[in-house]
Amino acid sequence: MTDAGIAALLTRCGQHSRVAVEASSPTWAFVDRLVAHVGTVTVVDTRKTRVKAGYAAKTDRLDARRLADALRRDSVVGIYYPPPAIRDLRELCRYRCQLARTQASVKQRIHALLLRHGVAAPTRSLWGTRGAAWLADLALPSWSGHSLGGLRALLNEVRQQLVPVLAAMRTTAATDPIARALDAQPGFGPVFSVTLRAEIGVITRFPDGPHLASYAGLVPRVEQSGSRRWSGRITKAGSPWLRWTLIEAAIHQFRRQDAFGRWARQLAVRKGILKARVAVARALCDELLAAWPRP
């Protein structure tokens, strides 16, 4: 919506007005413009909100009318509206994740380029001091050489971008009381603790671990008819960033020497490592709720 459109909307609203907004990419910027001028703003979860049918056509005006009707009936389901500080922390964590994925992708492309030319590296790792020096002196013919040089330059640029990002995450993990408490958990670190801090935001939104696991999309799909019950794959319906962090943190739990670690290793033997990681990630949700500091 344009500035003129928002200004026109605000002229029709007051401090007692209630506004419902469908969740989309520009939602937070739009809500920030409204929240100080109206009574309440509800960001609607369209997957859980049922609106009345009855219109043959589907237009933005009719959708807004249906949403307003649902708001009047108090039948809308809202989602969490994170404050600016949490949103900024999310940007930091998601930027680090994107950089890490780009770094891994570039490394894979360099390995693939060497394999296509039948070049074997003299060292086990290409990314240490010896490997980097060997890559710098390696000469490949024609455009393959240009490709190798460009990929190496891109890898160095990504690494430079990661330095201040990781420093900021370590600082947050040391200064934020919630991130510091999560960092003390077994198998966690600054990256996982700060990412969980950012993606969860307020822990009181979740009464227990299963609700947090459901928000992360780690619970199985369930279909039930009478006495028959069928469980399928995980829903993946929640936050993908939170789900990724919990799965990555679960990988490190198998090395724990306590009862939780023994249970995780036994589960991996019975069910396989991939299924066990998901189950361990779900179990971590209970530990997160227990470790999260309360005001």
Image: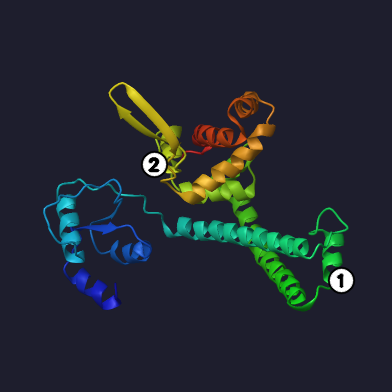
Which of 184 and 225 lies nearest the eye of the viewer? 225
Q: Counting residues from the N terminus, which is met first, the one under dot 2 or under dot 1?
A: 1
Question: Residue at left 48%, top 50%?
Answer: 240
Mark 1 residue type? Asp
Q: Is residue 203 above or below residue 254?
A: below
Residue 128 vs residue 213: left or right? right
Determine the secondary structure under disc 1. helix
Q: Is residue 219 above or below residue 49?
A: above
Question: Residue at left 57%, top 50%?
Answer: 194
In this view of the protein, can residue 181 be seen by the observer?
Answer: no
Residue 155 vs residue 134: left or right? left
Which of the image's four quarters has the N terminus? bottom left
Residue at label 2?
A: 205
Question: Residue at left 38%, top 29%?
Answer: 230
Q: Is residue 195 above or below residue 3?
A: above
In this view of the protein, can residue 80 be seen by the observer?
Answer: yes
Q: Which disc, if any, is residue 37? A: none
Q: Residues within 10 Å of mark 1 (few under 14, many from 20)?
A: few
Residue at label 1?
A: 137
Q: Residue 98 falls in which quadrant of the image?
A: bottom right
Determine the secondary structure under disc 2. helix
Question: Residue at left 84%, top 59%?
Answer: 120
Q: Residues within 10 Å of mark 2 (few under 14, many from 20)?
A: few
Mark 2 residue type? Arg
Q: Position of residue 23 (x, y in %)?
A: 33, 57
Q: Position of residue 271 (x, y in %)?
A: 58, 28
Q: Position of residue 79 (x, y in %)?
A: 34, 49
